[in-house]
Structures are given as structure tokens and as C-alpha cells.
């Protein structure tokens, strides 16, 4: 009986010894997987937005880089970056979005923190990270194997190891929760080395846009528009055009001035200045048109509906194409130039229904530079 008890005890001890390394390895892998500096992106938008969470993540990533900057500059270590996305309908679109966002995070540190493209290794996934669909995670700083300390006593040659060995990861575990449930990240943990201020400048756009219609500009009728975005769905736009050209000796006049306020509703938007819109506009103006033989001088009022599409060009500019249809009423005087005088002929009124606007405009997204920072 005692023999069987001893055999059972030895068997349980043997199973426990086998399980311990596996459990330790599993816990290590789990800890490594949960340790990351996470940058959040809005689903189906590629812009790297500045908010409290991302600003704090910038400070944590900067601290990690500073801790190993000398080795990174020598080429002995790299920064590992992983991108995750599942908010698009296909894996190809998700991989493209993840790659774009990883590059945006890298570009930020290249521009603001003296990094280089060669100092990163990026992996992108068409999957979520800890329940978050649109994030970029700076996972760790990894050293090349040959730069690590070698044992003094020769040992049996181990199995081939990967070329990069991860030795440092930010200990900021994130729980596996959905996007909306994840709380704001706490302030960055203090480092062992002395603190130092870290400041950067960031361009913040405002709801205002200043635009000009290239089609009218080509027709020597310079245009200027000012648009204010109330929110993602509504905006107001004011457009003005003016041509003031004349040659009195040849009796050629090309004088025209209009102003047109417009309210717009945006749908199928991909951002504040990216999407389709429909608008309601009114307007009025004055004109004097003559080509040497006969002239027309009068005033007009009009109203109608517009449709257009706007898309961004980089961070500071956008393009807009549109058309406006509606009703115009004008009352004008017809005259003839004779012996240095203008002889009145008749007064007429005209009603018109059809195209009133045609637009291909370039816009400047008005913004300002602000300082941000913290303490590393």
C-alpha cells in the first residue's frame, strides 16, 4: 500500500514539474502581449488625432525611446511597432489602414523626436488588439542578439534564436475590453533617470475654411469663399465673386459682383472636410457687360439647391467640386455706346431656371500651431 502511495506522489510531482515551465512561459507571453503603448484611431478614418490618450501615449513612447536611444542610434536595437485594424469590410483594406496608421505614428516621432525610418520594425494585422479594432501599439524595444552579454563559460550550443530579442517593454497592461469601455490611460509612470521636459508643436485645424473657385478664377472673375463647420453634419458657406475689368476707349466692360450665402447638410462623411453635401443657397449681384457694340447693365437675385463633394489634400488643404441649380430673376437696361455717350434702348426683365453655379475649388483648412508637452 505504501509503495502505491509513493508511486502516486512521484507521478504527481513529475506532472507538476512539466507544467510549471509551460505555465511560466504562458504567463510571460501573456504579460508581453498585454504590455503596449497604444495609439488610438477613429474607425475608418486615417487621421492621427490628438487627444488626452494619444498625448499620454506619446510621452510614454518618447520615454521608452530615450531610455534606449544610444543603442537605437548605433543600430544595436530597434523599436517594434504593430498596427491593428478590423473596421473595414475586407482584410486587404484593414491591412492597408493598419499600415497607414503605423506609418503615421512613425512619422510623428521622425518629425518631432529625431527618429529615423530604419530604426523601426513594423508588423500589421487585419485583426483587433485586446478588443480594440483601430490601434497602433508600440510593443517594445528589441536588441540584436549579438549585442547582448555572452556567458563566460562555453555551453552546449542552443537552438537558433530569432535575430531580435525583446528585453524591454512598457509595463502598462491594458484590459481586454471594447473600444468604448477602455478608460483613459493614467499619467506616465516616473522613470528612474532624471525627468526632463518634452515639448512639441502641433498644427490644430479649426472649423473655418478659406476657398477659391478655380473655374471662376480662370474666367478672370476672382472668387473667395469662407465656410464654417458647425459640426460633422452642418456647415454655412459664404461665396463672393467680382470682375472689374474695362477699357473705356474700346467700350469693353466686364464688371460683375455677386454674393451668395449657403447652408449645407453633409452625408456619407469620412471626416470634417471629406464627404458629400447638399445645400440651399440664395444670392444677388450687379453687372455691366459690353463688348464694344451693345451693353447690358442690371441687377439679379437667385436661389437654388447645390450638390458637391469635398476631399482632403494633406492636412492643410482640400478640394471641392459641385454644381448649383435654381431660379434667377434679373432686371436690366440695354444701351448702345454712341459719340462717347451711352444711349438707353430698353429695360427688360428675364426669368431663368437652370445651372447657376459650377465649382472646382481649392480650400485652406485654417488652423494654428499649439505647443504640447509634458515631463518624461
Image: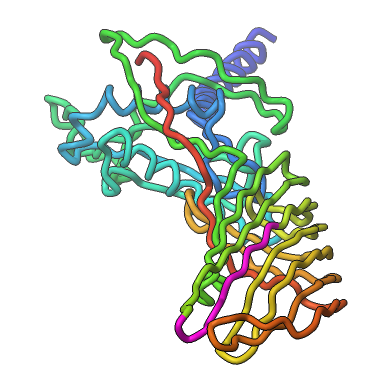
Q: How many marks?
A: 0
* Position of the N terminus by quadrant: top right
* Vertical placement of residue 89 versus 168, above or below: below
- Say which residue appears at 57% left-offset and 19% top-offset: 185
Q: Would you say residue 268 is visible in this rendering? A: yes
Q: Is residue 81 magenta?
A: no
Looking at the image, residue 243 sits to the left or right of residue 119; the answer is: right
- Location of residue 109 by image quarter: top left
- Percent across and percent down for residue 260 are 72, 57
Looking at the image, residue 7 sits to the left or right of residue 328; the answer is: left
* Vertical placement of residue 27 versus 84, above or below: above
* Vertical placement of residue 196 versus 363, above or below: above
* Position of the C terminus by quadrant: top left
Query: Would you say the magenta stretch is mainly helix, strand or loop?
Result: strand
Q: Nearer the viewer, residue 286 or 217?
A: 286
- Percent across and percent down for residue 3 are 62, 12
- Percent across and percent down for residue 56 are 48, 22
Q: Nearer the viewer, residue 264 or 11?
A: 264
Q: Is residue 254 magenta?
A: yes
Q: Nearer the viewer, residue 162 or 46?
A: 46
- Say which residue appears at 48% left-offset and 49% top-offset: 315
Q: Nearer the viewer, residue 359 or 135?
A: 359
Question: How is the model colour-coded?
Answer: rainbow
Instruction: Point out the stretch of residues depicted in magenta.
Output: 249-259
- Percent across and percent down for residue 242 are 57, 64
- Say which residue appears at 56% left-offset and 57% top-offset: 224
Q: Residue furthest bottom?
A: 293
Q: Would you say residue 18 is visible in this rendering? A: no
Amino acid at each position: 500500500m505504501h509503495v502505491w502511495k509513493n508511486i502516486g506522489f512521484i507521478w504527481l510531482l513529475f506532472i507538476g514539474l512539466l507544467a510549471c515551465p509551460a505555465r511560466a512561459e504562458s504567463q510571460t507571453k501573456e504579460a508581453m502581449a498585454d504590455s503596449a503603448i497604444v495609439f488610438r484611431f477613429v474607425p475608418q478614418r486615417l487621421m492621427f488625432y490628438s487627444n488626452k490618450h494619444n498625448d499620454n501615449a506619446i510621452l510614454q513612447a518618447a520615454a521608452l525611446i530615450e531610455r534606449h536611444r544610444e543603442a537605437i542610434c548605433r543600430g544595436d536595437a530597434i523599436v517594434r511597432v504593430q498596427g491593428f485594424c478590423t473596421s473595414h469590410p475586407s482584410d486587404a483594406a484593414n491591412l492597408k489602414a493598419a499600415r497607414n496608421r503605423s506609418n503615421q505614428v512613425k512619422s510623428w516621432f521622425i518629425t518631432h523626436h529625431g527618429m529615423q525610418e530604419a530604426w523601426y520594425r513594423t508588423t500589421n494585422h487585419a485583426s483587433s488588439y485586446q478588443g480594440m479594432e483601430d490601434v497602433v501599439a508600440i510593443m517594445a524595444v528589441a536588441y540584436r542578439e549579438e549585442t547582448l552579454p555572452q556567458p563566460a563559460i562555453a555551453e552546449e550550443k542552443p537552438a537558433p534564436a530569432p535575430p531580435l530579442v525583446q528585453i524591454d517593454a512598457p509595463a502598462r497592461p491594458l484590459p481586454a475590453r471594447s473600444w468604448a469601455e477602455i478608460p483613459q490611460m493614467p499619467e506616465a509612470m516616473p522613470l528612474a533617470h532624471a525627468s526632463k521636459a518634452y515639448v512639441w508643436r502641433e498644427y490644430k485645424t479649426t472649423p473655418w475654411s478659406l476657398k477659391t473657385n478655380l473655374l471662376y478664377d480662370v474666367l478672370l472673375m476672382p472668387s473667395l469663399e469662407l465656410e464654417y463647420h458647425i459640426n460633422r453634419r452642418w456647415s454655412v458657406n459664404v461665396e463672393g465673386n467680382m470682375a472689374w475689368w474695362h477699357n473705356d476707349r474700346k467700350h469693353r466692360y466686364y464688371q460683375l459682383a455677386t454674393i451668395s450665402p449657403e447652408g449645407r447638410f453633409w452625408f456619407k462623411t469620412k471626416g470634417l472636410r471629406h464627404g458629400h453635401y447638399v445645400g440651399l443657397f440664395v444670392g444677388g449681384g450687379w453687372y455691366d457687360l459690353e463688348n464694344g457694340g451693345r451693353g447690358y447693365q442690371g441687377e439679379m437675385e437667385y436661389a437654388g439647391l447645390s450638390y458637391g463633394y469635398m476631399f482632403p489634400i494633406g492636412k492643410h488643404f482640400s478640394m471641392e467640386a459641385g454644381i448649383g441649380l435654381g431660379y434667377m430673376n434679373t432686371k436690366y437696361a440695354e444701351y448702345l455706346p454712341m459719340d462717347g455717350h451711352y444711349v438707353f434702348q430698353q429695360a427688360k426683365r428675364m426669368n431663368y431656371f437652370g445651372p447657376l453655379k459650377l465649382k472646382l475649388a481649392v480650400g485652406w483648412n485654417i488652423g494654428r500651431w499649439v505647443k504640447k508637452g509634458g515631463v518624461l
